[in-house]
Image (spheres, rainbow, N blue to C red):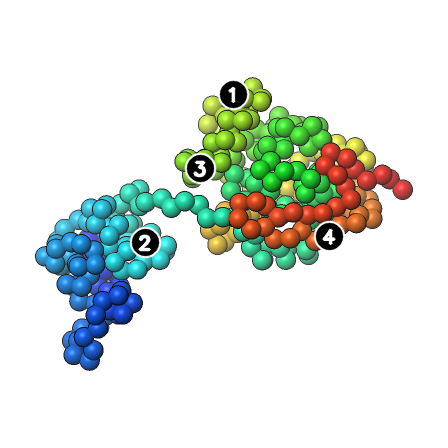
Amino acid sequence: MNSHAHLGAFLKARRAQLTPRECDLPDAGSGRRVAGLRREEVARLAAISVDYYTRLEQGRVRASAPVLATLTRALRLDEDQQSYLYALAGRSDDRPRRPPSAQRLRPAMRRLLDQLAHTPALVLGRRLDVLAWNQAAVALYTDFSAVPPDRRNYVYLLFSDPAVRGMHRHWEHDARDALAALRKEAAADPDDPRLARLVGELSAQDPDFGTWWAEHRVVTAAYGTKQYRHPLVGDLALDCDTWASPDGSGQRLMVLTAEPGSPSHDALRVLGSWDRAAARPEDGDGEDPPVARSSLRHGTRAPTR
């Protein structure tokens, strides 16, 4: 079977799975001789001729992008089925782009953060927005709850927040890697207006950002070592590992760990030992990341005992 024949087989199988009632069509009752919809009914729903639709099912004609769009609606295709339809037709690039949905923290990510009580961890979303964090991440980085939601972005903080920027011993290396990851995000969704505003603002604020952005460097590495200089516990060398959520949401869990028994591991234990009047971060709704409350304020740290 060629690709046109596979497409025709999918169309035939899909219309057999639907009922007239599901498609707001009159139901002729038990007198129907075919399972699901007739070809004539699909053609009517898609506003195309019966002859053209018949040739599509028979694999004798290539579907145009407008016809695929109408078939998507007529056959009530979900996201996976739409991707499959356009791939079979050889028109994946013609599939209409939908506006990105609001970023909602996955419950599984929330549970992972709760279980990593003594390990700094962040959940990053689209554009590397910081969607959630645990108290160990607050102790290491900053009080994310004190950062305005539209500024709660990993790259923005790395370039614009003096405390976050200053703690990176190799700031240029880390900043270039973060920017390269953001550049890869831009390729996946080049029309994202929030990403455009972020890039425009950082380009205006920091000449290095504009220069590095123009290089079109991208990275795919999900692990590495970060060197920090914390104002309270001194130097830390932490392994940074990032795991992507399997649901296609774009959410990633970023975890920072140290070798047990190392000075960095001891320093993390010290950071985690301070009492903080912290409430559990609440799951976010819409485009605003969740809010965590902490006695640590943005840009400051708890005193040592």
For the residues labelled 1 and 3, the Cα–Cα distance comes to: 21 Å
* Quarter of the rendering occupied by the N terminus: bottom left
In x, y percent, where is residue 199?
51, 29
Q: In the shown orientation, is residue 143 left or right of residue 76?
A: right
Residue 279's tag is: 4
Which is in the foreground here, disc 2 or disc 3? 3
Q: Verify CB contact (< 8 Å) between mark 1 and mark 3.
A: no
In x, y percent, where is residue 228?
71, 33
Circle 2 sits on which residue?
A: 82
Which is nearer the N-term, disc 1 or disc 3?
Answer: 3
Q: In the shown orientation, is residue 80 left or right of residue 213?
A: left
The local crowd at label 3, few if under 14, some if 14 to 19, many if 20 or more residues have their Cα within 10 Å, is some
Circle 1 sits on which residue?
A: 211
| Residue sitting at the far bottom | 30
The local crowd at label 2, few if under 14, some if 14 to 19, many if 20 or more residues have their Cα within 10 Å, is many
Identified by mark 3, the residue type is Asp
**Residue at 54%, 21% in the rendered image:** 204
* Quarter of the rendering occupied by the C terminus: top right
For the residues labelled 4 and 2, the Cα–Cα distance comes to: 42 Å
Which is nearer the N-term, disc 2 or disc 3?
Answer: 2
